[in-house]
Image (spheres, rainbow, N blue to C red):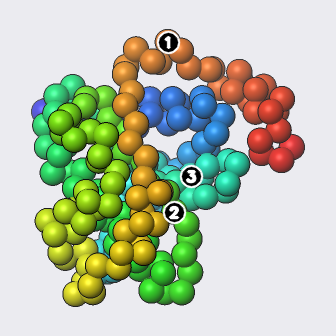
């Protein structure tokens, strides 16, 4: 019962994160790990598959966006999970580049509860990405750390705080369509 409840809370968190992010009118997230899991999976350097909660793109830049959602009401294991997220972002980007195509993927961490508060402002820095790779060397698949890729990744990381109460501020689906049409961000 607890696992089922956690799963439902996680799915609810993903839905709310999607609504919040899409309400900005800058992001479109048509794929989630529940309905379209194959669209949310990326491959690391070591061949391991990493599933994200949401996938889509940033409308203005057309850059792919992969979102990890942590709808926690406590810190939990977020510091450790966040380090794995950073290592995965590096590894996926390094694999793309190694394969000859930088897909310019962006990576977003969405949480309801702050963590690592003494270093919050530094959580998307090169230092943290390097620490993550030290903690998760399997993500490197034996390759050395490439400082140019570390730099690329730090510019593609997003760290977002949400609150359940933000739901009251969201556009409805119809309002969102009306606003998007008026803004012409999608090229309409």
Q: Nearer the viewer, residue 43 or 140?
A: 140
In front: label 1 or label 2: 2
**In the orientation shown, which residue stands out farthest toward the right?**
188
Per the image, the residue denoted by label 2 is: 105
Task: Locate residue 85, reporting x and y percent.
Answer: 29, 56
Determine the residue positioned at 60% across, 31% down.
24
| In the displayed structure image, the side of residue 177 where residue 130 appears, left or right | left
Determine the residue positioned at 38% across, 54% down.
52
SS class of the residue under badge 3?
strand
Q: Residue 168 carries which label?
A: 1
Is residue 42 at all visible to an observer of this figure? no
Q: Residues within 10 Å of mark 2 (few under 14, many from 20)?
A: many
Rendered position, 17 above or below 171: below
Determine the residue positioned at 48% across, 81% down.
97
| In the displayed structure image, the side of residue 104 where residue 16 appears, left or right | left
SS class of the residue under badge 2?
loop
Q: In which quarter of the image is the C terminus?
A: top right
Per the image, the residue denoted by label 3 is: 56
**Mark positioned earlier in the residue sequence (3 or 1):** 3
């Amino acid at each position: 019962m607890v696992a089922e409840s956690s799963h439902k809370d996680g799915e609810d968190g993903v839905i709310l994160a999607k609504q919040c992010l899409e309400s900005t009118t800058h992001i479109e997230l048509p794929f989630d790990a529940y309905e379209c899991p194959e669209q949310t999976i990326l491959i690391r350097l070591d061949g391991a598959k990493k599933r994200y909660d949401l996938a889509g793109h940033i409308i203005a830049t057309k850059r792919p966006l992969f979102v990890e959602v942590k709808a926690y009401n406590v810190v939990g294991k977020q510091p450790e999970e966040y380090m794995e997220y950073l290592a995965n972002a590096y590894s996926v980007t390094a694999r793309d580049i190694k394969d000859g195509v930088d897909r310019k993927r962006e990576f977003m961490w969405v949480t309801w509860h702050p963590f690592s508060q003494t270093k919050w402002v530094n959580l998307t820095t090169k230092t943290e990405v390097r620490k993550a790779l030290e903690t998760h060397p399997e993500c490197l698949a034996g390759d050395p750390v490439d400082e140019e890729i570390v730099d690329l990744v730090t510019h593609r990381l997003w760290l977002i705080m949400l609150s359940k109460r933000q739901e009251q501020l969201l556009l409805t689906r119809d309002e969102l369509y009306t606003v998007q049409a008026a803004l012409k961000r999608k090229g309409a």
